[in-house]
Image (spheres, coloured by chain):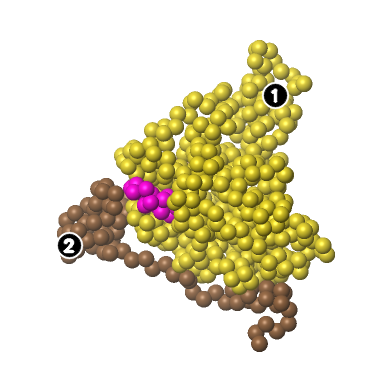
Chain colours: A yellow, B brown
Amino acid sequence: MKKSVGVDYSQFELSPIAFDYEKMMKQTGYSLSEMREIQLNHGVGKTPLKELKNITALARKVSKPGYGARIFIKDEALNDSGSFKARRASIACYHAKKLGYRGVIAATSGNYGAAVASQAAKYGLKCIIVQECYDSFGVGQPEIVEKARACESYGAEVIQLSVGPELFYVFLKLLEDTGYFNASLYTSFGVSGIETLGVELIEDCLRITGKVPDTVVITNAGGGNLTGTARGILQATNFPVQIVGASVNLKGLHMASDGDFNRKSFTTGHTGFGIPFITYPDRSDVPRSGARPLRYIDRYVTVNQGEVFFMTETLSVLEGIERGPAGNTSLAAAFSLAQEMKDDQIIIVQETEYTGAGKHHQSQLSFARKNGIDIFFGNPEEEIPGKNIILPRSLDCIKARDLNLMEIKESYLNNALKNVTQVHEIDLQYLSNEINEPIDYIVNYLQGKKIKMEAKNGNQIHKVG
Amino acid sequence: MVKKGTWVLVKKVVLLPEERPLTLPKDTLKTPLLMWIKGHLLEDASLGNQVQIKTLTGRLEQGELIEVQPTYRHDFGDFVPELQIIDNLVKAELFGGETSE
C-alpha cells in the first residue's frame, strides 16, 4: 500500500490507537489555493450554486407559516465526468503524475471511476477501473454498466467482477503487477480535493444571498464527501454551519449478497457503506483513512429510495434540471429539513450527478420492477429495501429520518477500543476529536468499560481536570 | 471464426465457490467469483473458446470468448407511469388548478 499511494503512514502514528490526523492531511496534501488551481486547469470546480425557487415554494406549501428555508443546489454534475468525484480524482491524478507513476487504478463501481478515467486521460496516464458490476447470472446493475461505458469512453480499461469483497484482493494483485498508483478515495489528497467544494459553496452563498448557509446536506457513504466538504466550510467561515449527512436507507440488504445485489436501486450514498465506514473509518484500502466524518457531522439522516426517485422527477419537472437519482439523496433530505427551518434561512444541497442511460431514475425504476420489486405510492416510511419502492403519496410523507448519532459514536468507540485494556493520555484527545465530543465523554466511556487510562508520567488517570 | 486483433469480451473464473471465504453470505458462497474483461484477440478463435487477449493498458488476460465487439445495451428503461403521476402531483400542489390546458 505504501508504494502504491506513495505515503509512509507509520510517521503519523502516536500510539497503538491514535495518529496525527491533521499532520497527515497537511503533509501529504496540497494547499487550498494549489488545489483550486489544479482543478480549474483540469475541468473541475466553480460549479454554479442554483436556487431551487420552485422546490422551495413546494416545501413551503407543506410547512408552517414562516417556515420553509431557501433551498440551493451546488450543481457538481457540471464537472468534467459529471460528479463531485472529479474534485478528488483531479488531485489524485495530479499527484500520481507528479510522482512519476505510469498509470492509476481505482476500485469503484461509482462515479469515482469515470472521474479517475477522465482525469487520467488529461494527464496521459494509463487507467484501470475495477468494478463490482454483475450478479452471478451476469445481470448488470444498469447504473454500473453506464459507469463502465463512461470509463471506456475516457480510454480506461475496465475490469468487471461479480459480487464479492474479494474485489479487494483482485485490486491489490493488479496494483502489485502493474505498479500503478492507487487512486484511493481514502488518502488525504483524495479527501482534501473536496475541500474546494466546501469553500466554494460558502463563497457562492455569500455572493448570492449576503449570508452564510445555515445547513449543508451532504450525501454520505465512505465518509470522504462529508469530511472534505466540512473541512472546506471550516476554512471558509467561522460562522456555525450545520453539517448534515444523508444516506439512502438500505437496511436489511447485505452488501456481499449475490441475491441482494440487483434488488437495490442505489449503489452508493447508502447506509450499506455509510454506517460501517462512519463507525470504523480505517476499514478502507489505506492504513489511515482521510475520511473521518464523525469529526464533523452534526446530524445523520436517512431517506428512502422512493423519496429520492420522487425528488429526482420533481427536480426535472419543476426546475428543468435533469440529474441522476444517486446525486439527489441530499435533495430529498433537504426537502424535508427545509420545512423545519425558518423561511429566511438557507439550506444547501451539496451535489448533483449527471444522468443518462442506466443511471436515469426511469432506468432504475424499470430495472427494479423487472426484478420483482413492487413500486407504488404510499408512505415511504414503510419501504422495505429489496422488496418494494414506495413513492411518497403526498409531499408531507417525505421525511429525513434521524439516525442516533450518539449510538453511532459509541459504536465507533467500541470498534476503536476492541480488546483494549489500557489507553494513553494522548488517546483521550484523539478519541475526543474523532467523535467530536468532550474529553469527559471519553473518560466516562472508558470508566464504564473499565479501561485503564495511563498519563504521560505513567500514573493512572482517574479524572480529567 | 473471429479474427486475431478483434475487440472482444472474455469471462473468467477468478475463484471457485469452494475457494471463497466462508464469511460470505450463503447465496454468494454458492457462486464463483467471475471477471469480465475486454481486449484484442491474440489469435483467431471461435465463441466459447479459451482465448488470450491484450487489454487497453497492454496487460495479457485470458478467459472464455463470449462476445465479439461488445455492445452497450443499457437504456432508459421501460415506461414508468408513476413518473407522470408525480409530475401531476407536484404541479398541482405548486401551481394549483388545471395545469394541462
Residue A228 is inside the magenta segment: no
Q: Which residue is mark 2?
A: B3
- How many residues crowd around disc 1 within 10 Å: few (fewer than 14), some, or many (20 or more)? few
Q: Residue at x 61, y 47 (%)?
A: A199
The C terminus of chain A - image quarter: top right
- x, y percentage for residue A310? 62, 67
Q: Is residue A94 visible?
A: yes
Q: Residue at x 19, y 63 (%)?
A: B2
Q: Residue at x 68, y 53 (%)?
A: A206
- x, y percentage for residue B48? 24, 60
> The residue tagged with tag 1: helix, strand or loop?
loop
Q: Chain of mark 1?
A: A
Q: Amino acid at mark 2?
A: Lys
Q: Amino acid at mark 1?
A: Lys
Q: Which residue is mark 1?
A: A450
* Vertical comparison of A258 with A443: above or below: below
Magenta stretch prevailing secondary structure:
helix
- x, y percentage for residue B29? 43, 48
Closest to the camera, between mark 2 and mark 1, is: 2
**Magenta span of residues:** A114-128
